Amino acid sequence: MKSLLIVNAGSSSLKFALFRLPILENSQSVFRGQVDGIGADTKFVVKDADGKVTSETAIAKQSAGGSAEAEHQAALDALLNWLDSQSI
């Protein structure tokens, strides 16, 4: 399936939406989700097109006093690993 992944990364969250291609005027995302609490109690949540939670995972803090870059990398890794597991 050809897809388009849109990512919005902020200081404490990473949000994403996955669309099938081609995108039409009324296209809805196939999946959407977010990683919240980056740098604190980080949680990765994915919802399907109907809004049903399909995956929810806690992400371990990288280390006490870890860098913001390491925490954001862990969030991105969680998203990429989930995409990999979906064969997307």
Image (cartoon, grey):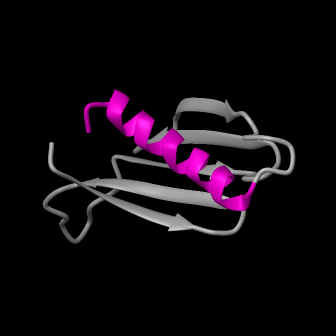
Q: Splitting the image into 4 quarters, where does residue 55 fall?
A: top right
Q: Quadrant of the N terminus?
A: top left
| Region of the chain picked out in magenta, as a range | 67-88
Up-down relation of residue 59 to residue 31 (above or below): above
Depth check: give the residue in front, 81 or 43. Answer: 81
The answer to which of 51 and 70 lies nearer the viewer is 70
2 in relation to 69, above or below: above
Q: Between residues 60 and 34, which one lies in front from this camera angle? A: 60
Q: Is residue 57 left or right of residue 37?
A: left
Residue at screen point 15% across, 49% down:
2
Find residue 78 and report its horizontal and vertical position in percent. Answer: 52, 40
Name of the residue lying farthest toward the right: 64
Image coords of residue 81 (percent x, y) = 43, 35
Residue 85 shown in magenta: yes
Q: Residue at x 42, y 43 (%)?
A: 80
Q: Is residue 7 above or below residue 81?
A: below
Could you tell me residue 48's position as x and y percent?
Answer: 43, 40
Task: Determine whether, in the image, residue 65 is placed left or right of residue 75.
Answer: right
Question: Is residue 49 visible to the viewer in this orientation of the structure?
Answer: yes
Q: Residue at x 69, y 51 (%)?
A: 36
